[in-house]
Image (cartoon, grey):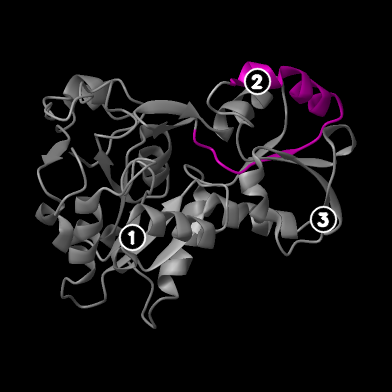
Amino acid sequence: MTDRAAAAPVRTLHRFAEVAESYDLILCDVWGVLHDGRRAHVAAGEALIRFRNLPGERPRRVVLVSNAPRPWRGVQAILDGYGVPREAYDAILTSGDLTHDLLAQHPGARVHHLGPERDLPIYEGLDLELVPAETAERVVCTGLFDDDTETADDYRDVLADFRSRNVPMICANPDLVVERNKRLIPCAGVIAEAYAEIGGAIVYAGKPYRPVYDAALSKAGKLDDLPALDLARAVAVGDAIRTDIAGAAAAGIASVLVARGIHAEELGLTAEHHTLGDIADWLSRQPVEPDAVIERLVW
């Protein structure tokens, strides 16, 4: 086991340009990096555009990798609305896409949708029947029905019923929380976590699990008629230790943590005038460390 206390300190970046030449592919998180749930982080989009325009032996590519429980076109529409330029990325891969692919393997399935109606496009084009919880063969959890007021405790009874019938769950958003309007909002991951605690069977569609990285690398590889990318030339950028950073590490990909995201309060970055200081102690208490930390994604 590596002695983390003796390891070299994590590098702090002032600008992504400091390391950009080292990479040909960015797997970029969306919520917390490119927008805050209301509007785009303009500088982040500009940084990705600058990266894509760098000269090199092969095109510089950006694949947005999101735990959003909806198809990629739905995420693109949201990004358009927030003002994230399409020139900032080459492709989008979502947890919704992976969930759709998983459900396609079970034609005719009786599925219960556990989550808000806005996520129903995840089932478009599939051979399945959406049914009440008590008759479901499978359950897809995309989130809480009312994430402003509910917690996982509100789902205790329905989860207990699923468990009594050994109903498998697909968690279509492994995130525990996201930031919205300066608040941390619970996601489908907290319900999946509660189901796992009572012995429920779960398949996670998204970060930090390996299939999403394999799918993202495959999508990136199809953009150009070139040999497979050396993983040393890929980097994941995200704001969550548990998903973005841990997932990248498990996939053998370098990572950059955006500090002013869901961990901002822990890092003392709740006010705009606060700046990133010495975070070595905080990092030493995390299950995994990034290769670098940046306050925001800027060029």
Quadrant in the rendering for residue 97: bottom right
Residue found at x 46% / y 68%: 219
Comparing labels 3 and 2, the label whose residue is closer to the camera: 3
Camera-nearest residue between 62 and 43: 43
**Whole-number angstrom distance, CA of label 3 to CA of label 1:** 37 Å
> Which quadrant of the rendered structure holds the C terminus?
bottom left
Q: Quadrant of residue 5?
A: top left
Amino acid at dot 3: Leu
Q: Is residue 102 left or right of residue 133?
A: left
Q: Which mark is residue 106?
A: none
Return the disc, 2 or 1, that comes first in the chain's sequence: 2
Residue drawn at x 17%, y 65% as measured from the top left: 50
- Disc on res. 197: 2
The local secondary structure at tag 3 comes to: strand
Write down the residue under mark 1.
Answer: 231
- Residue 295 lies, in percent from the top left, at 18, 38
User: Considering only order in the chain, which callout, 2 or 3, is on the residue closer to the N terminus?
Assistant: 3
Sequence-wise first label, 3 or 1 = 3
Q: Amino acid at mark 1?
A: Leu
The residues colored magenta run 150-175
Q: Which residue is mark 3?
A: 128
SS under mark 1: helix
CA distance separating discs 3 and 2: 28 Å
Name which residue lies at 37% across and 32% down.
Answer: 181
Q: Is residue 171 magenta?
A: yes
Q: Nearer the viewer, residue 174 or 285?
A: 174
How far across and down, in percent of the image, does residue 51 sit? 20, 64
Q: Is residue 200 above or below residue 54?
A: above
Judged from this view, the residue extending furthest toward the bottom is 225
Label 2 crowd bin: few (<14), some (14–19), many (20+), radius 10 Å: few
